[in-house]
Structures are given as structure tokens and as C-alpha cells.
Image (spheres, rainbow, N blue to C red):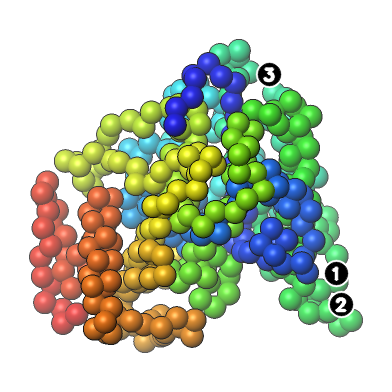
Amino acid sequence: MLHGANQKRNVLLIIADDAGFETEVYNNSAVHTPNLLSLAKRSLVFNNAFTSVSSCSPSRSSILTGLPQHQNGMYGLHQGVHHFNSFDEVQSLPLLLNKANIHTGIIGKKHVGPASVYPFDFAYTEENNSVLQVGRNITRIKLLVRKGTRKQRPKSQQAIFSVRGFSRHAQMWALAPQYGAFCEKFGNGEKGMGGSLTGPSKIHTRSSQGIGLVLEELREAGYDNDTLIIYSSDNGIPFPNGRTNLYRSGTAEPMLVSSPEHRERWGETSAAYVSLLDITPTVLDWFSVPYPSYSLPSSPSAPVHLTGRSLLPALVKEPSTWNTVFASQSLHEVTMFYPMRSVHQGAYHLLHNHHYRMPFPLTKTSTSKNLASDAAYSPVLQSLRQLLLKWQWATGDPWVCGPDHVLEEKLEPHCRPLYNGL
């Protein structure tokens, strides 16, 4: 779906940190999120949206490149001693948009690098501010959005791509009282204040308030009728079987896509299986920016291709064949190495745990039944295995041969046995 290059268009991408489905949009009446609910009424709501990796920096890198973490190089967290970075040659979304003379901005949690791969014209992130201010203080966020949307730009650079990252780690809300109290004492676990289970609910309500302020600034700046809005999260909630693994509870994400030019399905839900890897193709489609032809040092003979798809067609008609998503987990912190790959197709979910002999129950969950050894499902297992392997090869996965083989470092590599008993 292509659009005229001379049309005035903008994109607002809202990424919440560790957000789940505990909002009114997904039928949780106990949490008050009116602004998010209002946005949903002007959006297509996806019930089967998934991240391709359940960890902060790797997921954000995949959102901003359209490439899974094992392909773009962001294997784990970016900050501090972990220090993972995307490969220098990666053509990220902000980089491509900058080359197309589209103004880019980011407010809040960024958590990716290097800066040469992720350049933004307007940036207020943890790299140059306190994340408690630019990621959690919704009044500060509102003023920064106002500053960014009303900033004078050359007439040739009127389109805007803006990333708004709401950081919502509950346990960090009161770490810096010198910046002001961002939440009430109620629910902090102190005597007479109630239990901490109220924390996630307050965070969703606060995020909804922030989203309302951001959208109000968008309207005041005159961008509400030409802006594609995408709301989602980077990974699953930080609870057991949640973030940092590839079970559904770790990868399933909320996703709302609102287009002023595609109103046919406003207020509807979609059962299509979609991925955060689809965000880059969607934004490129919206701006009619082509994806370049290039290769990465890890696979010099293989051109990089986006395996995601534009979501714009789904805003017009429910897709009948979108039933498969892939995921890839390698590390979280630098010492947290548990490589997994998965393919989720309809009712079936194949999870390949490379280190299945680790002395903790990564392979056990009370929410699913392991059908891998059931002969009746052997055709399904083989089909999913082939799908997953095809995707791994297509995306240059260096772990494609694991855990019992290793990938050769050649122009046309093959898997060689490790003779490690796995």
C-alpha cells in the first residue's frame, strides 16, 4: 500500500515499558484508563500482537530496525557493563527517515545504541536527562512534546516521526524524591498504605493520563488528522513466565494502530498475528520510504530483508493468512544467557530452548501442554521446525545451529558438529 510522497503525514509511536493487558481496552474494568480507551475507539486493536524478544534493549532495537535482535546485534541490554549495541551497518528506522528528510524525535526511554545507528533530531532520553523526568513525569513529557511538535523546521522537512517511551517499572517510581513525588504513598507497602499490588494499576492509569496529554498536544499542534499513532510495549510484564522468556506471557503485547486515513475498522479488534517487527515496515509504508539493499558483516553474501509486514492493509480488511509470528531471545543482562527461538502459529507454539539442560525449570510451565513427544502432532512439530529454521537462516541467526552444532564463519556457512552430547 503506497501513498503519495507529497502528502503531509506524521507518525507517533508510543512504547510503554513492560506493559501488559491490564487496561480497559483489554476488558479490565478495575483499572481506569480513559485516554487509552478513547484512543482504542479510533484504532484497530490487535489481540494477537507479540514482541520478537522479551527484553528491553533487544526489543527496542527490533522495533526501530525491523530486524530481530540476533540479526541487528543488540543481543542484550545496552546500558552499563552489559554494553550491547546494534551493528554499525544496520539501517535503522530513524536513520532511513532522516535520509528521507523526515524530522525524527524521541522522548523518554531510548535504551539502544550506538547513536550513529539511532540518530534523532530531537531527543530527550536517559542519555541526556533523568529518566524519572523524561520517562515518568507526565507534565514534563507534555511540555517536551509541545516543544518538539511546535519547533520550526525547514518547509522541506515537515513530516515528523516521534517515539514516546513511557517507562513504568513500578519499583523505581520513588527512587529520586528530589524530583518530586510521582505517585501517592497509597499502595507502597508501608504500614497503613496498602499492598504493592496496586502499583501496576496506578502505573496504567498514570500512563493513560500521559497518553492523553500527549494526544492533546498533538491536536493543539494541528497534527491529529494526519498522524498515524501506534501504541504497544517492548516486552511482557515482569512476573513469572513473563519478561525475558518466550512464553506467551513474555511476548504477548497490547497493540493499537490508529490511522486518520483508514477509518473503516475504528473501534474493531483483529485476531491477526502481528509482531513488533511489523512496526518498521508499517512506518516506511506510511511515508512511502523504500527499504535499502545492503548486507551485514555477519552475512556479507546475504542482503538484509525485513521479515515483518506493513500493518496498513489490516486497517482496511481483516487478513486471513496472518497467523504466524517468530521470536528470538539470547540474553537479558550480560550474565543472563538463555538462548531460545520460537514460532507461534495459531494454536501451536514451538519453543526451542537451546540450553534445556540448565538446572532451572525453563522448560516447565503450568499454562501449556508439551505436545512435542506426542506422535499425533509430529506433522505439526516438523512443520513448525521447518518454519523456524527457514526464518533463522533468512535473518542470519548465529545460533541457528545450536545447541549441538556451530555455524561456520564462511561466505556460505554450514553447521558443524560440536560433539558436546546435546
Q: Is residue 226 visible?
A: yes
Identified at 50% across, 31% down, the residue is 286
Amino acid marked by disc 2: Met
Amino acid at dot 3 = Gln
Tell me which numbered mark, 1 or 3, is placed earlier along the sequence: 3
Picture coordinates of residue 301, whole percent (x, y): 16, 41
- Could you tell me residue 314's position as x and y percent? 50, 44
Task: Name the side, left or right, on which 55 lies relative to 221.
Answer: left
Please give the label number shown on residue 185: 1
User: Crowding at label 2, few (<14), some or many (≥20) Cα neighbours within 10 Å?
Assistant: few
Which type of secondary structure does the marked residue at label 3 adopt? loop
The answer to whether mark 1 and mark 2 are in CB contact below 8 A is: yes
First along the sequence among labels 3 and 2: 3
Residue at image x 59%, y 26%? 9
Q: Is residue 226 above or below residue 138?
A: above
Query: Residue 205's image quarter?
Result: bottom right
* Residue type highlighted by circle 1: Lys
**Residue at which label 2 appears:** 193
Q: Is residue 235 visible?
A: no
Quarter of the figure with the C terminus: bottom left
The residues tagged by marks 3 and 2 sit, at their Cα atoms, a distance apart of: 47 Å
Q: Is residue 66 above or below residue 400?
A: above
Decide which of 27, 51 is in the foreground and name it: 27
